[in-house]
Image (tube, rainbow, N blue to C red):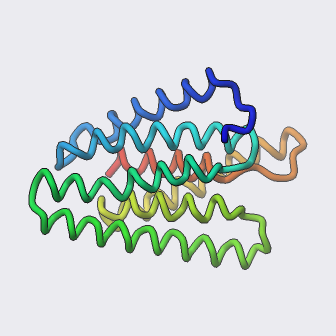
Amino acid sequence: MTRGVPVWQLAAAGLTGALLGLAATRDALFPATPIVACVLFAVLGVLAIIDARTSYLPDPWMIAAGAAVALHPIIIGATSELAVGVFFFLLAAVGASIGFCLFAITRMVTRGQLGFGDVKLAAVLGGWLLPFGWQALGVAAVLTAIIGALWMMVALSRGRRAAPYGPAMIAGAILATGLI
């Protein structure tokens, strides 16, 4: 499940993610958002370190991230107005669908240069970001492209032919959450 990544690195990545989640959502409209962001970003931090070290995004961690994204609008609906929670749930579903479809098409066009774990991660991140607005998706896409390009240049300078894209996607989403 962690593909041999040392426990201390997983713990550090999870703690860093949790702290970034709290920082990125400090001014959130709903009290549940920082709590969910803390949990989600901790899981995303673990996913980022595993992907960076192994080029693999394990399904159990992806399921945990997806569950956090799905629980966010449910908790909002339970703690504020049900209609708001339902609306946010629909936005999350649309965001997840958009992320999944765009990355699935990209995976097909690039003939497997993008892994299916990245496609699933795009669904999770789209589901998290769209309730914050369309601009959150746009900012995340731009930041992900910039970070991914820089990540790839570093990999190429070290003689590698490829670099995992998941860490760039996660960094772009976390930064977009904090900026929006």
Residue 140 in the image, given as x and y percentages of width and height: 47, 57
Residue extending farthest to the top is: 8
Q: Up-down: is 107 above or below 24?
A: below
Q: Which quadrant of the view contains residue 157?
A: top right
Residue 81 in the image, given as x and y percentages of width and height: 9, 60
Image mark count: 0
**Image position of 147 (left or right of 93):** right
Residue 4 in the image, given as x and y percentages of width and height: 75, 32
Camera-side residue of 67 and 112: 67
For the N terminus, the image quarter is top right
Q: Which quadrant of the view contains residue 6?
A: top right
**Image position of 134 (left or right of 30):** right
Which residue is depicted at the point 21% across and 41% down? 27
Camera-side residue of 153 and 70: 70
Residue 136 in the image, given as x and y percentages of width and height: 37, 59
Q: Up-down: is 39 above or below 125?
A: above
**Image position of 167 (left or right of 69):** right
Residue extending farthest to the right is: 159
**Image position of 113 (left or right of 49):** right
Camera-side residue of 25 and 141: 25
Which residue is depicted at the point 38% across and 59% down? 129
Which residue is depicted at the point 62% across and 21% down? 8
Which residue is depicted at the point 30% across and 64% down? 133
Q: Which quadrant of the view contains residue 102?
A: bottom right
Camera-side residue of 47 and 16: 47
